[in-house]
Amino acid sequence: MAHTPDDRTSTPDHDFATRAIHAGQEFDPTTGAVVPPVYLTSTFVQDGIGGFRGGYEYARSANPTRDSLQELLASLEGGLSAFSFASGLAAEDTLLRAVLKPGDHVVMGNDVYGGTHRLVNRVFVPWGVTLSTVEMTDLDAVRAEVTATGARVLWVETPSNPMMKISDIAALAEIGHSVGALVVVDNTFASPYLQQPLALGADAVVHSTTKYLGGHSDVLGGAVIVNTAELAEKVGFLQFGIGAVSSPFDAWLTVRGIKTLAVRVDKHSSNALTIAEALVSHPAIEAVHYPGLPGHPGHELAKRQMSAFGGMLSVQLVGGSAAARTFAESTRLFQLAESLGGVESLIGYPTEMTHASVKGTELAVPENLVRLSVGIEGVDDLLADLTDALDRLGLTS
């Protein structure tokens, strides 16, 4: 029996790992190639004026490679539509432009990614939007803030960056909706493999696809996934009208990374849990922030809301900022670099790196904190690298 591309179409009832490999990835109907080609073209020939082939006209408005990624992202997040962008901040910017106008208010957590806060505070606030931050794990405080401000957007990041706080998505969605706010969840740290915000009541999900979705530190990208046709129309128009789209090759690299997302995140999570458990008792460590630890204040919520605890953790050192800086610069397998979610392990000093833009504000990161993106290397090698660097500090608790 001959096969057609439709025979290979993934369905919503397929397992996550199956959809990660097959959704939007039907084989090429011309050659039978298992991997769809990369459409490296800026424009498309028309069959007469306005006669588009497959709806394609110009690469900013649509491209088959980008479409395949967007179909895949929508499937994995359980959304109606997904949109791929050139970076995570381009995705966030487009979503916010789609829903905000001067006079609107945004409420976000007091521990969000510094670039997200900078985007709203330095781009949207001068435009006339107002912004406030709140402890997102305190539901009463959130309810009071969104009610007092009449928030248009409630921005949730869980696990948070870099303190690894866990926020109750379902409860926050209910609170946000009670005042008519759009509830957005940054799902970058968890990935759709571990957490499904739309199923818990969120209206939109954002990602830096650079991180776990791409997974190999070789591509820059972002995504917005939405649950309604109205929001999809607004975001889709701005994706076209502003044009901060992902390139075909970046889209293809992201798809390639997503195919192994499930097996990678399983390994990231198991490695991170082993490391977190080991570091808790090290005399140079003041605190370990990882939701997989029973002592983490969000542990029970994370168990209900996530299928595992992810590959990100942060530690605070006994010796203050000097010890933290030395530690971050002393590891070997953990390479000193911004970003996260790749197969290789990375270490960072947030107060001077990822969160430098909020230094000196209420969102400032503790100066003795170091963030770890735990990769998929051998866990014994990773643990030896960390403990060797910590032991050389000569610190005791």
Image (tube, rainbow, N blue to C red):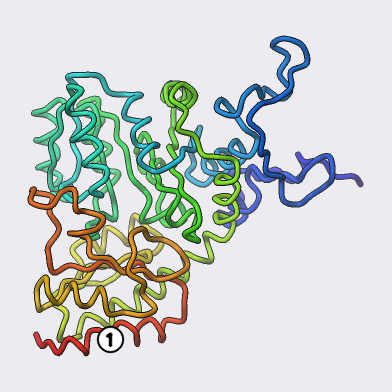
Residue 358 pos. (x, y %): 15, 49
- Give the residue drawn at x 56%, y 25%: 61
Residue 147 pos. (x, y %): 12, 29
Circle count:
1
Q: Counting other residues with Cα less than 10 Å from the Cα at mark 1, is it few (<14), some (14-19), or many (20 or more)?
A: some
Residue 65 pos. (x, y %): 63, 39
Q: Which residue is mark 1?
A: 387
Residue 156 pos. (x, y %): 26, 43
Q: Amino acid at mark 1?
A: Thr
Vertical side of 260 occupied by 319: above or below: below
**Outermost residue, right direction?**
1
Q: Nearer the viewer, residue 219 or 66?
A: 219
Q: Quadrant of residue 367?
A: bottom left
Vertical side of 81 occupied by 47: above or below: above
Say left or right for 283 vs 55.
left
Secondary structure, mark 1, is helix
Vertical side of 189 occupied by 173: above or below: above
Q: Quadrant of residue 304?
A: bottom left
Say left or right for 47 vs 280.
right
Q: Quadrant of residue 17?
A: bottom right
- Give the residue drawn at x 22%, y 77%: 327
- Give the residue drawn at x 26%, y 30%: 177
- Give the residue drawn at x 66%, y 26%: 43
Q: Quadrant of the C terminus?
A: bottom left
